[in-house]
Image (cartoon, grey):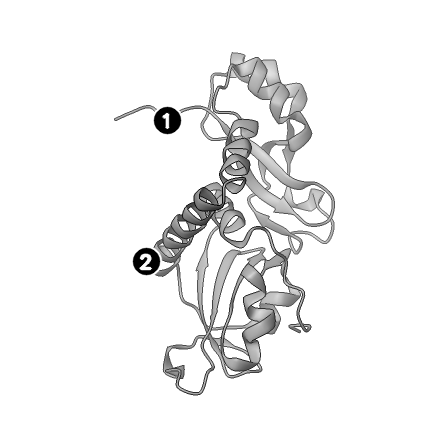
Amino acid sequence: MTEEELKLETKCYDANEYGYIYGLNQKIPDEEFEKVKPYFRKFKRMDFVEGNVQVTGRPEGWRCLEKDVAKVEEILGITNTLEKRQNKVKEAFADPIKKANLIDKSYEWLKLLFERTGTHPEQDLSRLAVHSTKIYDPQDSYKKGADKGEGELFIYTPHGFWYIINNSGEFADKSLNNVKTPQGGAVGYRLMYDDLVDRLIRIYTEENLYSGEKLF
C-alpha cells in the first residue's frame, strides 16, 4: 500500500471567527510535532461562539489557522502545499475549457459520493438553513428555479454537508423526496465533513453563496 503523502487539510469551517481550520492528515512523531506545535492550538467545541451551531466539521484536536499553514508546511518539509493546490484550481479556472472540464468532473464526483455513500434522512429545508454555516447555490440555480421545481443547494451544517436537489416540479416523482420545502419537497443527501468533498463543492459551485428569498 502506498504511504499517504503528508499534508495539511481542512478539518472544519467556522462561520463566526476563524473561517477554515486545518489539521495534519496523519499522525507524525512527537518530536516532529513539537517543531510546529507553537502554530497549533488544541481546540474544543466550547471554544467556538454558540457552541457547534456555526461550525461545520471536526474542530476538536490540534488545529492551525490558515495564516499559519505555510509556516507549518515549511518546517515539516511538506511539498503538497495548500498554495499549490489552490493555484492548480486558479490556473484551471483561467482557461475556459479547463474550467468547464474541472467543474464537470467535480459534479460527477459529488453526485457519486453523495448518492452512493451519503445518508438520506428526513429533514426540513428551513431547519437546515437556520443552522447552516453557509449555503452555496451553483449558478443561482435554486434562487432562479425554486418556484419551478428546479435548482440545487449545498448546505454546510453542524452535522456535515447536505446536497439538496429541488424535486417539486409538476411532473416530479415526489415520493422520492425526503426534505420538506415550501414548493413541495426536495431530494437530500448528507455526508460528514471531508476535505475532498469541501474542495469539490467549492469548485463546482464556484463558491457562489445563496442570495435568494429567505429559506426559513
Residue for point 46% across, 83% down:
169
Instruction: In the rendered view, tell whether residue 107 sits above or below residue 199.
Output: below
Q: Is residue 193 visible?
A: no
- Residue kind at label 1, given as amino acid type: Glu
SS at mark 2? helix
Q: Quadrant of residue 74?
A: top right
Q: Is residue 104 visible?
A: yes
Residue hosting label 1: 4
Residue plotted at (50% across, 61% down): 162
User: In the structure shown, which secondary structural element does the residue marked by tag 1 occupy?
Assistant: loop
Q: Amino acid at mark 2?
A: Arg
- Seen in the picture, residue 205 relative to 150 is either above or below; the reply is above
**How many other residues sit within 10 Å of disc 2, few (<14), some (14-19) or many (≥20)?**
few
Residue found at x 59% / y 51%: 207
Q: Nearer the viewer, residue 119 or 162?
A: 162
Per the image, the residue denoted by label 2 is 116
What distance separates the C-alpha of mark 1 from that of mark 2? 24 Å
Q: Is residue 180 above or below residue 9?
A: below
The spot of residue 216 in percent (x, y) is: 66, 74
Query: In the image shown, does 205 or 215 lie closer to the viewer?
Result: 205
- Is 122 left, or right, of 82 in this rendering? left
Where residue 67 appears, as percent x and y from the top left, is: 68, 29
Quadrant containing the N terminus in the rendered view: top left
